[in-house]
Amino acid sequence: MRFFGLLRHRAPRVSGVVAILSAISLGVLIAQPPVDTEQRIRHIQDGILPAVINPGEPPVVTKLADRMVALHIPGVSIAVIHSGQIEWARRFGVTRIGGPAVTPDTLFQAASISKPVTALAVLHLVESGKLNLDTDVNQYLKTWKVPANSFTEKTKVTLRELLTHSAGMTVHGFPGYASDAARPSVVQVLNGEKPANTPAIVVDTEPGTVWRYSGGGFVVTQLLLEDVTGQAFPKLMHDIVLGPIGMTRSTYEQPLPQNRMAEAAMPYHQDGQAVQGGPHVYPEMAPAGLWTTPSDLARYAMEVQNALAGKSNAVISAAMAREMLKPGKNKWGLGIETGGSAEHPYFTHVGANEGFQCNLVAYNNGDGAVIMTNSDNGGQLAAEILRTIAYEYKWPDFGPHETPARKEITVSSDTLAKYAGIYAMAPNVNMTITLADGQLISQMTGQNKIPLFAESETMFFPKVVDAEIEFPRGEKGPASQLILHQNGRDMTAKRLDEAEAKKVVDAAAAFDKRFKDQTAVPGSEAAVRRMIGELQAGKPDYDLMSPNLANATRQQLTGIQSMINGLGALQSVTFKGVGPGGADIYTARFEKGSLDYRVWLTPDGKVVDRANLGPSQ
């Protein structure tokens, strides 16, 4: 759920996070007079655009450097493809706080963008006659077999289904393993055996019937490729894909070899804290294990574009490229998401590993961009950079949304004063409306202040988001409610009475002081210790959790319990500080490793948000 596009629901971070980026057309891809490349770069780095722009008004822009600071993102690396070539590549920030600058050779984890690169290897072997997209994968698997059950009796799993996320296989994505934690073999991952921290990968829906994102299916693909070629996965990927394409900086080696660690960006959490122990290790290499640069990923995109145009067959032919990009269920091709119009189709993928987020978009006809970051907030910034690039290059997709023209009017201060107050949008989420110098200001819990402008005495709009706020007509006293109109939905929020509002204000003031002093909520350490013990035993007290956290814990209990028990006995719990989102952050140290734990605690001792164990994505 999003209010104003600012209150972001944070789904579990997995290496297979899938995002569908949408925006209305701002133009068409047509021939344009030459534009100085350096000027374009300056426009982008000095003018990150909001999600919404208003006709006839200059957009309110921010500098890329300022957005990096605001989002606690140490480093960003970008490559832009134009007319079939890398037109420019630039780096911003540092590989780690206090460390060296990001360079052209700085490696980032590609996370789920590993999948479409893996898919090229599969398709190459299909064209070589060594694989068939529509054959039962158990005919190729030697080390392990897809477990038989009632679903596989009806329909066998095929490579086509694995690549298109329609094989009915479980496990969305993978949290990886802390650098000092025990790591499973690929077969242990497939079977969900210790020290694997995810459940067994099985078929629980008839293959071919539904689309459901499954990183687990790509682990099956990884083992299949090793069994068929007789080579370790990093080597076969280098020989079949990375080498022929010219992705010279890239590797699927996990962990990254020690002699290359100096090339790697270090990962950071949303609150700006470094991921404990540095980059996580991903034995699940096919879905999440690629180390690369934006320029190398751009070379992947250009290879697909060139193959499609019949200009290259270094890995796959034009016919196979067409097959790869043919939209299937949920507009998914073979290893890659597709989109766009018939005139301007594109392929895309995003990625999110622990402390790394990135984005790849490429039009079939030769334009595109790759953005890589070393922060859990990087997905937000990547989307902002992408829409600014799209606007600068006049792409038909991904750019800012252009709102209908609205005429501002002046409303008396007496009328505006009736709307000031605190309105309950959702549990623990409020919208505060204040009046300052004749201007209404809105602020969502934990978010920035946004000015509101009147189009009538009861209807107001922000200029940075396509939304409207309506207050009831005809009320003589203070407004009793507001209605948020956004994305075709209406949400009514009741105004809090004075006593309730005072509690909110007092709580905000208390948090400001707690954040300034970096003081833990009383009882939060005890809650961390209690929950770790309960998770180790597999018996969480769901009554001491919010409903969302309880549901998430039930769904992931087996994997979480296995992961924690694999670390051995708990040795210490140390308070690290208070995050900007209000979480008390602790480091829990075990015999065989450590975890960062974030906990939000209510006065009655309930954990009200998702307890975020360091490796849980």
Image: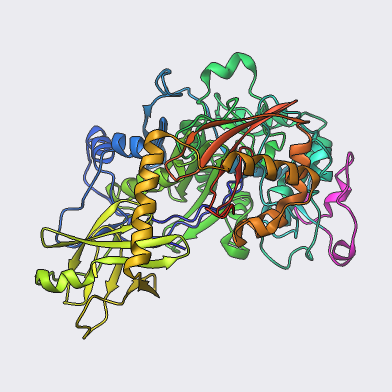
In the image, 422: left or right of 306? left
Q: Quadrant of the C terminus?
A: top right
The overriding secondary structure of the stretch rendered in magenta is loop
The answer to which image quadrant residue 571 occupies is: top right
Q: Residue furthest top?
A: 259
The vertical placement of 290 against 27, above or below, is above
In the image, 185: left or right of 100? right
List x then y, in percent, for residue 297: 51, 36
The answer to which image quadrant residue 234 occupies is: top right
Residue at (80%, 35%) from the top-left corner? 195
Residue 124 appears in the picture as rendered: no
Residue toward you, 229 or 556: 556
Residue toward you, 236 or 410: 410
Residue toward you, 556 or 498: 498
Residue toward you, 600 or 306: 600
List x then y, in percent, for residue 449: 27, 53
Residue at (30%, 77%) from the top-left corner? 480
Residue 189 appears in the picture as rendered: yes
Q: Residue furthest bottom?
A: 474
Q: Is residue 422 magenta?
A: no
What is the magenta range? 132-156
Residue at (45%, 42%) from the top-left corner? 377
List x then y, in percent, for residue 243: 61, 27
The answer to which image quadrant residue 209 occupies is: bottom right
Residue at (84%, 54%) from the top-left corner? 136
List x then y, in percent, for residue 372: 46, 36
In the image, 92: left or right of 247? left
